[in-house]
Amino acid sequence: MHGFANPARFLRLARWLTPLLMLSGGLLALGAMGWGVLLGPADSLQGDTVRILYLHVPTAWLGMGGWTALAISSLTELVWRHPLAGIAARAIAVPGAVFAAICLATGSIWGRPAWGTWWIWDGRLTSMLVLLFLYLAYIALADAAQRDGAGGSRVPAIFGLVGAINIPIIHYSVLWWNSIHQPPSISMGKSAMAPDFLIPLLVSTVGFSLLFGGIVLLRMRALLADQQAEARLRRKALAA
Amino acid sequence: MSAIKAKHQRLILALIALVAILAAGALAAWALRSQASYFYLPADLAANPPEAGRAIRLGGMVEAGSVAKAPDGVTVRFVVGDGKARVPVSFKGIVPDLFKEGSGVVAEGRLDSEGRFVADNLLAKHDEKYVPREMKDMTADQARAAVRNTQ
């Protein structure tokens, strides 16, 4: 891991990995959604509404997975002071927020025909909305801390770690509390979902995950470039 | 106490903090156990009946064969059960598409003085099973077996 403490080495790897991840992820996600929407079957109970699943479920998982990765980065930042950890956490926050927002929007669109309501203050829905707000708060906090200069990544890292408590709450909300949201269809290698739905869903999830990774690398490169530009300006100002 | 490496000290501190946060979250979730539920089950109503007229939500399964239209043509009567208790419900209005016998429902409304639930709004609740429409004509058991066989 500390081999990448040198950003130049990370950048060499990220330069070719970024387009590879984004391209393959985008193709897989689009292909799986096209397959599910155009060729896949309709659900016996919900009919064609079910097709929004291939966007809703991967974005939900990645919204939650994103914060998990952000929390691990934050822990790495706090304990090992890895120079890329804080940058990775900041890079994850933006696509994480976007994916959480897509999950909420598609969930709302799905909820209208399936449940009969756009929104209710149910445990699952509310905890997912809290996750979106946590992402937005993290982005604001990390930007403010960045402007404060050296050592400013400590506070967002603590926030990232504390916010991780919401992840098990989202997951267990449908099991602990009576909820309008369905319990998980897939758990511990068991699936209550016919393979006609499951396979495109899994392909779509792999695709969106690769896409997410590509966006994170892209953002990390941009943040590193920002850092370098700022350091160079500072040096110039000192020399002048 | 000899010197512990600074990063190990930070690791221990971070882990202690993490455990404390998780414990706090678990305690809060535990305390919210009944309050954070979106609806009452029929068994909850039977065990701990709320006063008549208080706005509550009732969730459970629509009992098979219980759905009936009242003579006025707009009121639907059915029974919501959870295997332990049953609550008769009446609702005046248009039911959601997924409202079916043997399927989940969440009713918003209140108990009247006779212990009947008067709903102002119905929400449908579907379960976690997804079965292609082509398999619809099978019975529920056959479809479940087909899903199981292909897993």
Image (spheres, coloured by chain):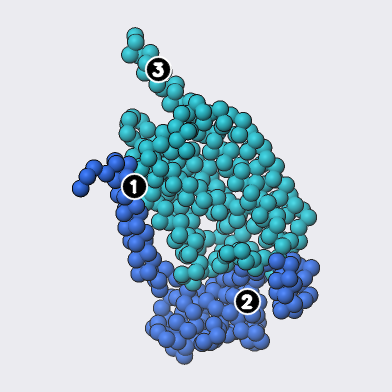
Chain colours: A cyan, B blue
Res. B11 mark: 1
Asked which quadrant contains residue B149, the reply is: bottom right
Question: In the image, residue A121 lies at what x, y percent?
Answer: 47, 63
Amino acid under disc 3: Leu
Within-10-Å neighbours for mark 3: few <14, some 14–19, many 20+: few
Within-10-Å neighbours for mark 1: few <14, some 14–19, many 20+: some
Relative placement, left or right, of A120 versus B28 is: right
Residue B8, compared with residue B39, is above or below; it is above
Question: In the image, residue A223 lies at what x, y percent?
Answer: 47, 30
| Rendered residue at 50%/52% (across/down) | A64
| Rendered residue at 34%/39% (across/down) | A154
Residue B64, compared with residue B137, is above or below; it is below
Relative placement, left or right, of A24 versus B35 is: right
Res. B103 mark: 2
Distance in Å between CA atoms under marks 3 and 2 = 65 Å
> Do tags 3 and 2 sit on the same chain?
no
Which chain contains the residue that carries disc 3? Answer: A
Distance in Å between CA atoms under marks 3 and 1 = 35 Å
Amino acid under disc 1: Leu
Which chain contains the residue that carries disc 1? Answer: B
Label 3: which secondary element: helix
Res. A238 mark: none
Which chain contains the residue that carries disc 2? Answer: B
Label 1: which secondary element: helix
Which of labels 1 and 2 is toward the front? 1
Question: How many labels sit on residues?
Answer: 3
Amino acid under disc 2: Ser
Distance in Å between CA atoms under marks 1 and 2 = 50 Å
Judging by the rendered image, the residue that carries numbered circle 3 is A233
